[in-house]
Image (tube, rainbow, N blue to C red):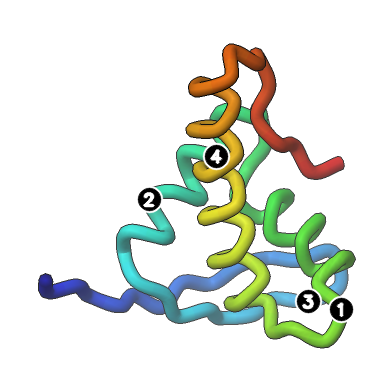
Amino acid sequence: MKTTKTARSVRLPDRRTTIEMEDEFWDALYEIAGRQNIGLDELAGRLDQRRGDNTLTTALRVYAVSYYRSAVSAQETGAATTPRIN
């Protein structure tokens, strides 16, 4: 499986930063942000505040995987919610 990494600029509340990730993660994060009615910058900012010792790139990847795993689990159990970050 071939994948491409893309670097994108993200505006956080206190700075701008460039993040390089696989296109599949970018697509997933844009979709997640859209489902939560927020922009990618806001989603990244919220995750940045909660990431602890992890890099922001790692936090974004882990959140995307966790989001979709929770969505699949919710669908299998009949729950109506997917994770949101406040």
Expressed as whole percent of the image width and height from the top left, the position of residue 41 reads 66, 55
Mark 4 Cα shell of 10 Å, populated few (<14), some (14-19), many (≥20): many
Q: Which residue is labeled 1 in the image? A: 52
Q: Nearer the viewer, mark 3 or mark 4?
A: 4
Would you place residue 78 above or below residue 47 in this image? Answer: above
* Residue found 79% across the figure and 68% down from its top: 48
Q: Are marks 2 and 4 in contact (CB under 8 Å)?
A: no
The residue carrying mark 4 is: 32
Reading the chain from its start, which is encountered first: label 2 or label 1? 2
Q: Name the residue that disc number 3 marks.
A: 15
- Foreground residue, 41 or 67? 67
Q: Nearer the viewer, mark 2 or mark 3?
A: 2
79 is higher (above) or lower (below) than 2: above
Quickly name the residue at label 2: 27
Task: Of the two numbered discs 2 and 4 on the same chain, state the one appearing first in sequence.
Answer: 2
Residue occupying the point 58% across, 12% down: 78
Residue 13 position in % (x across, y down): 84, 64
